[in-house]
């Protein structure tokens, strides 16, 4: 992964992607500490259902959010396997999410990202749609070769959760 | 002045460190008013001096000025011109406070107004120096050089006049006498040719001339007054070696031209800047380094990191240990070493974070001093155990609660001097602050000898506020009632005065202490004072915990909350768990213990309502019934494949403050040292968890917050709390007289009891190992032959069929190793020792009592032992009886059990025994009768043993009666006090043989003396 990162130009960014409710989502890889396959969770009873539980990664305890639940997609079928995305300290202390259908790392031009606030173009509708259905984590959309990728800002998870508890 | 930030920081932290003890030192110094300790004064002086030197180096004029003035005042002490009266100390303390403030904000320090304090200091200085030392009106005058540094000289009135009305320029000239190439005499002569020397002095930075002179510099300072301007002045040849600085009476902003330095080789900035004695800071730095060897400063960050690594290592160690348990491979030894070293490493690193509690304790002398002044009371504080160390984080969060408690003591505990005098107390109130280790915990004791807490008022408020009903209060012990003041909202504005204010915000203290997983207890005696007892863990980072499993997940319960564990089997699950109100309860040693099911707690995110409680209770009642039926079916051989039942029910008995409850879990695994990691900020609002930890198997386990669970389930405020069973009610009456006893059976018939303190241990033995020698039975335990006593051999009680395994109770204080055989250990219970000695008596029995629905025989084990070895004892007894005929012994003992026991020993040996329950009663007897010997307990109500014997010895008639102090506390302190009070001997209770020997000896020697 580090090799790829070295090649990143200023206007190019790597995004870690996953699929949720048939849509492709992406998180800036610079926010991601590591991606980990299936582990065992320790559930935290009494916590909101968006909290999946605690995991231990090399002696450090992380709190894992259940992203499908958080984004109100918990009933979506077709889970192929759970992956953890652990965020860096700069995003939030000891926090991660669990996602289904982890995808590839894609490289995109920053110019290709349509900021959410800019309306009236092709992607506008889909963003609007997204907003109505779930809490607001997306900061924009990016047109890839074959489809659109919703760009997620992980810092928003924490805000959204803080509002819940 | 651009300086390296690091050096600057170093200066700040070092100055603070120097300043830290000054407060305390000053107060100690104040107390030595008639006999000031020079060493202490020098220490204070040195600290201020160092700060002064360094501050000028950094251009912090205000700090420099203040320290300088303080130093001047301090030097008046040194010259013994003034005594450390409190008016001086007050101002010095105030000044040191200001120094603190300035150091906290060093960059801005020059903008802080210090004129007020300087004036105060100067006023003290001027008044006293003029009054004491100089009739000619000498004054210390401060001059400023061009960079604003102060230089002071002593000037008399005439010279001052000259200076004020003249156009001449004043200079400070500094010569280092050690490097001087000409004689001081020639300097003075030369200078006088072109001007006047108004004042001069010689200073040295050596604090102790005997020790430090060789390394120190001696500086000759001259206040020179001349028409010559600077350019001309430097042409004077003898001034080649001098530092010259033009002086002004008024302070000038430091933008004026750079410093003029005439030295042959211009030294570092520090040499030029400071007018008084430039090399001081460096010299003192060196000195300090030699004073405290082997310490370095480490960033807390780094320590925290080390701590994290250590805890991580602990986890790996735990994992390794588990792996090795299973594999049993050859690497066992290396893992054992890893285990050992990790433990040691962990401990060492933990200790790096430890700080002595003295760091906060010492602040309190100051607080108490100030409060006493404000409140017009006389209060002293005595501090012990300052060296006890606690984790840094705990220390930091202890300051507030402790301050609160101390304030409470001063404000509400200690009475005014008048009041105290009227009560016959010393005018000066005493607050004792004590820290000590006990059982892996730190105990902090804050004690005052004030008026105590008025329990009646506490009760009234408790009822008025609806915390308790009047009925509840009847059943509560004093301790429990006092603890009510810790409840939130217990006092409000209108009850403060009623309650003498105690309790204002005490709930905050309690919650703070509990946050640190500590406990708080209050003891109070009306008119005598109040004691707050805080118990705290040494560290919060790693705690021993009990690991339990519920619904397949592991949870940790802090060991400090765990009292005991219990497990019910088979029938007991249905029968022993009852329902009281809507709560499942279990009778644990005749107390109702509410039961909480952990799985239900976890399942219900909302605080339990009454309805939820009863639903749970009903659900599990049916469950238990069904379980019981299935179990019975299976036991009857009606087994079917789909039948599953639970054959045991484990619960952990947990204490929260004074409350107890049982937490039912699926499985109890064991204790483990766990590393506490705080809950994620997102989960802080959850009540039931304290934190999380990584277990040896790599999974995360949650640490339960017991108190949170208690609140969640409503157990603490629960209706069945403290509700004793009816037949135990009279126990309350004898609460102070409670003894723990062991109940056991020998065979099927009688139930026996022995006082637990009399028992050394209980051994499980195989009956096949019992050997017979003539008609006696012995067994070998730890290479000792132990004589076995069967109750049915000694007493007229039922026999017992030997089973394969039986128990042997080994009593303490036996002349020969002896054990009492029993078939079944039933329980230990607390009960009073009011025994029935009428209905059934036999030699070897102390009495009977109805316990656990059975008549219970209390065994006199020593009598039994005598009966077991009649040969030895009969010989002795015969002798004794002859000797002791007509000897009268006065026995003082408040506990009826011991009274009867000890009395029995004496009576058996033929003495005539009179008993008294306390010292006062004893005195009455002794003044009206003649006794040959006094045997007295020490701790007794009304009048204790010490006071008693002192009173006895006061009377000439009684001063030779031999006396023995009898006590359960065998410490040197008690022993010494007993002897000092007038006791001749000191014996430990229950050591029957030694006691009797002592008695015989004393009586013998008395007789000899008499002859």
Image (cartoon, grey):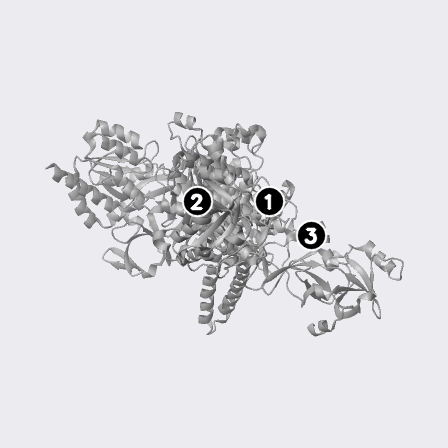
Return the x and y of residue B162 as percentages of the image width and height: 48, 39
How far apart are the alpha carbons under marks 1 and 2? 32 Å
How far apart are the alpha carbons under marks 1 and 3? 53 Å
> Which image quadrant is residue B530 in?
top left
- Crowd rating for badge 1 (residues with CA inside 10 Å; few <14, some 14–19, many 20+): few
- Give above or below for B685 relative to B128: below
- Give above or below for A35 relative to B407: below
As drawn, is B94 to the left or to the right of B927?
right
Return the x and y of residue B620 as percentages of the image width and height: 60, 48
Q: Secondary structure at mark 1?
A: helix
- Write down the chain letter for disc 2: B
Q: Is residue B714 visible?
A: yes
- Write down the chain letter for disc 1: B
Q: What residue sits right under mark 2 in the picture?
A: B199
Indicate which label's residue lies in the foreground, 1 or 2: 2
- Does the CB distance between marks 1 and 3 fall below 8 Å? no
Quick one: which residue is furthest to the left in this view? B1011
- Write down the chain letter for disc 3: A
Q: Earlier in the sequence, mark 1 or mark 2?
A: 1
């Amino acid at each position: 992964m580090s090799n790829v990162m070295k090649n990143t130009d200023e206007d190019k960014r790597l995004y870690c992607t996953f699929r949720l409710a048939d849509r492709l989502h992406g998180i800036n890889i610079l926010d991601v500490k590591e991606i980990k396959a299936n582990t065992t969770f320790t559930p935290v009873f009494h916590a909101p259902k968006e909290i999946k539980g605690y995991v231990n990664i090399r002696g450090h305890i992380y709190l894992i959010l259940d992203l499908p639940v958080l984004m109100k997609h918990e009933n979506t079928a077709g889970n192929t396997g759970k992956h953890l995305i652990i965020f860096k300290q700069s995003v939030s202390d000891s926090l991660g999410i669990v996602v289904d259908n982890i995808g590839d790392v894609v490289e995109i031009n920053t110019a290709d990202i349509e900021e959410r606030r800019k309306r009236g173009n092709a992607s506008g509708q889909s963003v609007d749609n997204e907003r109505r259905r779930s809490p607001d984590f997306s900061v924009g959309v990016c047109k890839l070769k074959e489809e659109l990728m919703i760009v997620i800002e992980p810092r928003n998870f924490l805000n959204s959760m803080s509002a819940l508890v | 002045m651009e300086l390296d930030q690091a050096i600057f920081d170093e200066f700040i932290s070092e100055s603070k460190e120097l300043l830290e003890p000054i407060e305390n030192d000053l107060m100690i110094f104040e107390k030595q008013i008639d006999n000031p300790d020079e060493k202490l004064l020098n220490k204070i002086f040195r600290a201020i001096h160092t700060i002064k030197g360094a501050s000028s180096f950094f251009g912090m004029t205000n700090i420099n000025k203040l320290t300088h003035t303080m130093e001047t005042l301090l030097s008046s002490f040194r010259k013994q011109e003034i005594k450390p009266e409190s008016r001086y100390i007050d101002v010095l303390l105030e000044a040191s406070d200001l120094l603190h403030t300035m150091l906290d904000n060093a960059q801005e320090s020059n903008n802080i107004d210090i004129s007020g304090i300087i004036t105060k200091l100067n006023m003290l200085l001027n008044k006293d120096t003029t009054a004491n030392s100089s009739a000619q009106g000498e004054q210390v005058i401060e001059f400023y050089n061009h960079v604003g540094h102060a230089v002071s000289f002593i000037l008399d009135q005439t010279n001052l006049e000259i200076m004020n009305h003249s156009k001449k320029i004043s200079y400070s000239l500094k010569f280092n006498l050690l490097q001087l190439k000409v004689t001081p005499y020639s300097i003075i002569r030369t200078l006088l040719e072109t001007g006047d020397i108004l004042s001069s002095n010689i200073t040295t930075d050596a604090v102790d001339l005997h020790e430090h002179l060789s390394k120190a510099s001696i500086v000759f300072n001259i206040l020179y007054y001349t028409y010559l301007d600077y350019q001309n002045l430097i042409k004077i040849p003898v001034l080649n070696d001098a530092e010259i600085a033009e002086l002004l009476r008024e302070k000038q902003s430091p933008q004026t031209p750079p410093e003029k330095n005439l030295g042959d080789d211009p030294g570092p900035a520090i040499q030029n800047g400071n007018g008084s004695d430039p090399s001081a800071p460096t010299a003192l730095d060196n000195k300090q380094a030699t004073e405290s060897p082997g310490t370095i400063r480490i960033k807390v960050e780094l320590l925290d990191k080390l701590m994290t690594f250590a805890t991580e290592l602990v986890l790996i160690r735990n994992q390794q240990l588990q792996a090795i348990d299973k594999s049993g491979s050859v690497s066992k030894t290396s893992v054992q070493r890893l285990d050992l070293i990790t433990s040691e490493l962990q401990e060492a690193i933990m200790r790096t974070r430890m700080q002595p509690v003295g760091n906060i304790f010492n602040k309190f002398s100051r607080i108490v001093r100030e409060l006493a002044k404000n409140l017009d009371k006389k209060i002293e504080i005595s501090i012990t155990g300052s060296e006890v160390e606690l984790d840094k984080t705990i220390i930091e969060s202890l300051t507030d609660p402790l301050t609160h408690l101390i304030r409470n003591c001063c404000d509400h505990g200690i009475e005014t001097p008048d009041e105290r005098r009227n009560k016959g107390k010393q005018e000066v109130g005493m607050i004792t602050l004590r820290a000590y280790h006990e059982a892996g915990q730190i105990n902090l004791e804050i004690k005052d000898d004030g008026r105590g807490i008025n329990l009646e008022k506490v009760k009234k408020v408790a009822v008025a506020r609806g915390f308790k009903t009047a009925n509840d209060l009847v059943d509560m012990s004093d301790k429990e009632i006092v603890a009510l003041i810790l409840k939130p909202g217990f006092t409000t504005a209108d009850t403060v005065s009623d309650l003498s204010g105690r309790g204002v915000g005490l709930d905050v203290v309690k919650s703070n202490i509990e946050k640190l997983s500590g406990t708080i207890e209050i003891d109070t005696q009306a008119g005598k004072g109040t004691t707050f007892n805080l118990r705290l863990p040494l560290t919060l980072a790693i705690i021993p915990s009990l690991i339990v499993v519920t619904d397949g997940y592991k949870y940790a319960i802090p060991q400090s909350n765990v009292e005991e564990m219990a497990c019910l089997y088979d029938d007991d699950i249905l029968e022993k768990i009852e329902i009281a109100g809507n709560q499942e309860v279990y009778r644990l040693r005749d107390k109702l213990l509410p039961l909480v099911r952990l799985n239900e707690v976890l399942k219900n995110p909302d605080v339990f309502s009454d309805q939820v409680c009863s639903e749970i209770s009903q659900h599990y009642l049916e469950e238990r019934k069904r379980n019981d039926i299935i179990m019975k079916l299976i036991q009857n051989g009606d087994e079917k494949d789909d039948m599953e039942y639970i054959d045991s029910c484990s619960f952990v008995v947990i204490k929260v403050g004074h409350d107890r409850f049982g937490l039912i879990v699926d499985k109890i695994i064991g204790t483990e040292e766990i590393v506490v990691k705080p809950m994620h900020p997102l989960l802080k609002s959850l009540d039931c968890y304290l934190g999380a930890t990584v277990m040896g198997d790599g999974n995360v386990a949650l640490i339960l917050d017991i108190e949170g669970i208690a609140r969640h389930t409503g157990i603490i405020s629960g209706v069945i709390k403290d509700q004793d069973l009816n037949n135990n009610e009279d126990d309350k009456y004898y609460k102070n007289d409670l003894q723990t006893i062991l109940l056991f059976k020998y065979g099927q018939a009688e139930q026996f009891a022995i006082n637990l303190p009399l028992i050394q241990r209980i051994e499980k033995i195989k009956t096949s190992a019992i050997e017979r020698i003539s008609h006696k039975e012995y067994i070998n335990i730890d290479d000792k032959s132990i004589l076995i006593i069967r109750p049915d051999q000694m007493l007229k009680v039922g026999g017992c069929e030997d089973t394969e395994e039986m128990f042997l109770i080994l009593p303490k204080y036996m002349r020969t190793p002896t054990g009492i055989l029993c078939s079944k250990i039933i329980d230990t219970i607390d009960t009073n020792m009011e025994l029935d000695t009428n209905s059934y008596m036999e030699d070897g029995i102390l009495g009977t009592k109805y316990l656990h629905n059975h008549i219970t025989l209390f065994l006199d084990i020593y009598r039994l032992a005598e009966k077991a070895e009649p040969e030895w004892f009969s010989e002795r007894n015969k002798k004794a009886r002859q000797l002791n005929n007509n000897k009268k012994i006065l026995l003082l003992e408040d506990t009826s059990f011991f009274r009867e026991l000890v009395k029995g020993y004496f009576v058996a040996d033929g003495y005539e025994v009179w008993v008294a329950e306390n010292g006062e009663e004893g005195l009455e007897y002794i003044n009206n009768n003649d006794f040959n010997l006094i045997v007295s307990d020490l701790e007794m109500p009304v009048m204790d043993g010490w006071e008693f014997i002192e009173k006895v010895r006061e009377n000439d008639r009684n001063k030779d009666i031999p006396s023995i102090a009898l006590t359960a506390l065998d410490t040197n302190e008690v022993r010494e006090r007993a002897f000092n009070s007038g006791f001749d001997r000191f014996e430990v209770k229950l050591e029957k043989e030694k006691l009797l020997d002592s008695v015989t000896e004393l009586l013998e020697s008395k007789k000899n003396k008499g002859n």
